[in-house]
């Protein structure tokens, strides 16, 4: 029980740290162009809800950490709320010069695009670091080597075997292997592998490791980490990886809408599970996974859904074409519907993460 609590707290802390850093970079992407344009930022918050601690800088911006660490926001001068759905119209002409609301469409659009753009730039930098320093992390379930005294090797598994199932549970990646092993209640194990186009089944006892009051079981197999890329290949892969992830995410959203599949989508619980698995595979895999999350956050915020950056950009584009902004009433209704849609999506993916592993 104590070991479980320690693992849970460690995973939660790592998840919060990684997510908070990615959110910080996102909000910094809004903050920096706003400062450049002379737009006053009242609040820069990591997290939502009541403030834990913070400070106010020389330009009057309150930097703070809040209790709910599942996002963040910047609140611009004159905004009635952090989502910028309305503005305080009682401010003076001098104060209007500091408000985002009264700036040109171009400046408002740049500030909105800044957040997602920062996430993509962060992802590119992290991907490059991983590819150049260690190569692409191996995500398949193919065996690259064995640990000392490996029960899998003793049972007859060989390098190159691709694990397809553990005790009847299908696995498609090494993270699936780790998850399946974590669910074992006894050392008896039935492993199915693919070798030279054929399927082979092995039954044996996994090694057990005592950790306090709990017991874990291990196969004693390892996957390859791959060789470090050359500089040019690292740059190319770092630039193309976010594009491919964005396309895959778009396909996942399409499949969800068409009710064909939700395999490509996940919420905070899925991210926390991913961080836990990544942590067990090394620092570079954690960095790689952080790049994946940053890419997904950047893409998600570009969707033309009111309350998201993409929703603001959509309204700014309409304003640029029409020569006048969309009416406040329409924007208010759109933001309410958009918020409802996001809450529903969050509930759906959370349900999927909990009940459909």
Image (cartoon, grey):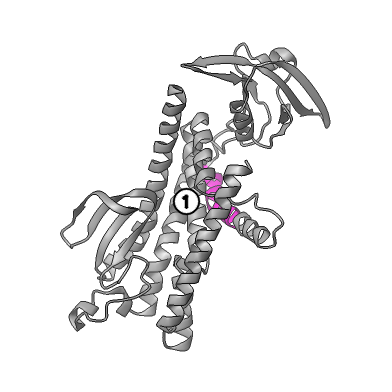
Is residue 211 visible in this depiction of the protein?
yes
Q: Is residue 241 magenta?
A: yes
Secondary structure mostly taken by the magenta-highlighted segment of the chain = helix
Quadrant of res 256:
bottom right
Reply above or below: 153 against 75: above
Residues drawn in magenta: 231-246
Reply above or below: 115 against 123: below
Q: Residue at x 46, y 65 (%)?
A: 308
On the image, the x and y values in percent for residue 27 come to 36, 58
Residue 244 is left or right of residue 77, and the answer is right
Q: Give the camera-side residue of 220 and 91.
A: 91
On the image, the x and y values in percent for residue 356 come to 64, 43
Q: Which residue is mark 1?
A: 294
On the image, the x and y values in percent for residue 159 come to 70, 23
Reply above or below: 326 against 6: below
Q: Residue at x 44, y 67 (%)?
A: 307
Q: Residue at x 19, y 82 (%)?
A: 92
On the image, the x and y values in percent for residue 89 come to 26, 81
Residue 35 is left or right of residue 312, and the answer is left
Residue 138 is left or right of residue 307, and the answer is right
Looking at the rendered image, the quarter that the C terminus falls into is top right
Q: Residue at x 52, y 47 (%)?
A: 292
């Amino acid at each position: 029980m104590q070991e479980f609590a320690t693992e849970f707290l460690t995973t939660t802390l790592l998840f919060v740290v990684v997510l908070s850093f990615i959110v910080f970079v996102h909000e910094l992407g809004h903050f920096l162009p706003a400062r450049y344009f002379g737009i006053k930022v009242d609040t820069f918050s990591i997290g939502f809800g009541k403030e834990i601690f913070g400070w106010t800088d020389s330009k009057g911006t309150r930097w703070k950490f809040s209790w709910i660490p599942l996002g963040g926001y910047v609140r611009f001068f004159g905004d009635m709320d952090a989502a910028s759905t309305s503005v305080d119209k009682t401010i003076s002409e001098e104060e209007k010069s500091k408000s985002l609301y009264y700036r040109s469409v171009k400046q408002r659009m740049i500030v909105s695009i800044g957040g997602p753009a920062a996430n993509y730039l962060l992802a590119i930098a992290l991907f490059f670091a991983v590819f150049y320093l260690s190569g692409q992390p191996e995500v398949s379930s193919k065996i690259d080597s064995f640990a000392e005294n490996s029960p899998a090797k003793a049972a007859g598994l060989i390098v190159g075997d691709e694990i397809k199932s553990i005790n009847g549970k299908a696995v498609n990646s090494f993270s699936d292997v780790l998850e399946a092993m974590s669910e074992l209640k006894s050392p008896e194990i039935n492993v199915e592998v693919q070798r030279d186009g054929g399927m082979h089944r092995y039954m044996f006892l996994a090694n057990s490791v005592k950790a306090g009051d709990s017991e874990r079981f291990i196969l004693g197999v390892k996957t390859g980490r791959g060789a470090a890329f050359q500089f040019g290949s690292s740059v190319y892969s770092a630039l193309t990886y976010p594009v491919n992830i964005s396309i895959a995410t778009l396909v996942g959203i399409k499949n969800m809408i068409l009710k064909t599949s939700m395999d490509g989508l996940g919420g905070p619980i899925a991210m926390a599970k991913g961080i836990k698995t990544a942590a067990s595979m090394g620092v570079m895999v954690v960095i790689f996974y952080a790049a994946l999350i940053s890419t997904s956050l950047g893409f998600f915020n570009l969707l033309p859904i009111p309350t998201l950056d993409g929703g603001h950009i959509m309204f700014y584009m309409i304003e640029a074409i029409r020569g006048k902004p969309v009416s406040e009433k329409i924007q208010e209704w759109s933001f309410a519907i958009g918020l409802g849609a996001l809450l529903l999506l969050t509930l759906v993916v959370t349900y999927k993460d909990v009940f459909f592993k």
